[in-house]
Image (spheres, coloured by chain):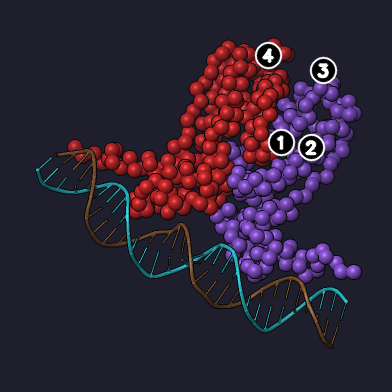
Chain colours: A purple, B red, C brown, D cyan
Amino acid sequence: MPDFREPISRGAGARQRVLQAALQVLHDDGPPGFTMEAVARRAGASKATLYRHWSTSGALMVDAMDATFQPFPVPDTGRVETDVAQLLNAFVAVLEHTPFPRLLAAFMDAAERDPALAELHADLTRRRREPVLAVLTRARDRGQLSAELDLELVTDLLTAPFFYHRFVAHRPIPPGLVDHVIAHVLATGHKSAE
Amino acid sequence: MPDFREPISRGAGARQRVLQAALQVLHDDGPPGFTMEAVARRAGASKATLYRHWSTSGALMVDAMDATFQPFPVPDTGRVETDVAQLLNAFVAVLEHTPFPRLLAAFMDAAERDPALAELHADLTRRRREPVLAVLTRARDRGQLSAELDLELVTDLLTAPFFYHRFVAHRPIPPGLVDHVIAHVLATGHKSAE
DNA sequence: TAACACCGGTACGGTAGCGTTTCGATGGAG
DNA sequence: CTCCATCGAAACGCTACCGTACCGGTGTTA
């Protein structure tokens, strides 16, 4: 019985190399430099190979960005503040010491003009929020947070400032920001503080 | 006595037209389409004219974005919440019903790769924050907010979620978000609530 | 080992932007 | 009215990317 799925070994090898190269090009040269030629060159691949897998550079960008996602493990230290701090500190580290933010900036712009990219970006963001939401939900179930809290809103308030500092204010993230944000945002919802 | 400043009438006319066209091109086509040729075409100007004023497309983008800034008037209704709500609602309207966000997305990406653009962006953001900061400072001086509050942090928490929803989560801004954010963020600092 | 799907390399004509130059028109200043 | 800086238009050679096509080599599979 024939296997109609795409072969794994050979095809996937080139495919992975191309996706990796696509991320590098997007990081180094941004949307203006993101061309099929440039990606093929960087990947040591043929343009024909690229067009075999992706009909447009936009489709390639979607697949490349989709491959970047890696979930943070959900911590459980017993205190909500500590759990959230751990997640946010990890995220700040990614924002400051990895190529991810430059990639994300290019992607945010591209998503403004391509609905497919916007949809993928929305999905990636939803997945990125999950660990924070999980920590908050667990805390609420344990009675550590008020049941009336809108956890989605709290997640917004906890994470948004770091995007804001990095991409909008274009300033380095102050050392104490994580703790200050947590202190202010979680001050309201604490069961013990009511 | 000769006037060594640039003449106003003729020179400034073309200059303004070019800046306007630059914004349109950046909005419609994004960074990849932002070329000297495209801007000149849209402005009905000659490439020579563009190169006379701006040596690179990056320099042109800086001037064009700088021309977009228009400060919000500082409201004074008597209540902090109402003042902030007025500013945030105006901002949400800009995010949802003007070409500004698409422009900003392109600019955020470009700023990742050009320090001059990053510096300008930081400055524009600082100016955009000022009305909110002014409202909060006045409220504190009037004794309506706790003196211990970090007003910069509060401004972050108040404004960041809207950028986040628009550019990161890529979702429409929920109708009640302005009020919910204000309620949660200003709940802590209220003098009357302490 | 033989067949085959996939791959990298190369070349193609076509299009577009680059940065510069030249020219004639135009409109404001003295 | 005259002068002259500025402007729009056009053309220049150059480079880069587009999308497609064909080739010979190579690893996988039967």
Query: Callout 2 environment at 10 Å: few (<14), some (14 to 19), or many (20+)?
Result: many
Q: Are marks 1 and 2 in contact (CB under 8 Å)?
A: yes
Q: Which of the two residues, A169 or D6, is positioned nearer the viewer here?
A: D6
- Residue D21 vs A192, above or below: the answer is below
In the rendering, at what x and y percent does residue B61 appear? 46, 45
Chain for disc number 3: A
Which residue is drawn at the image coordinates 57% and 28% (left, top)? B93
Q: Which residue is mark 4?
A: B191
Residue named by callout 1? A159
Q: Quadrant of residue A4?
A: bottom right
Badge 4 sits on which subunit?
B
Residue, x 67% and y 39% (percent of image)? B170
Q: CA distance from mark 4 to mark 2?
A: 30 Å
Residue A16 picture location, percent across and down: 74, 62
Res A194 label: 3
Q: Find the distance from the CA under tag 3 to the CA under tag 1.
A: 24 Å
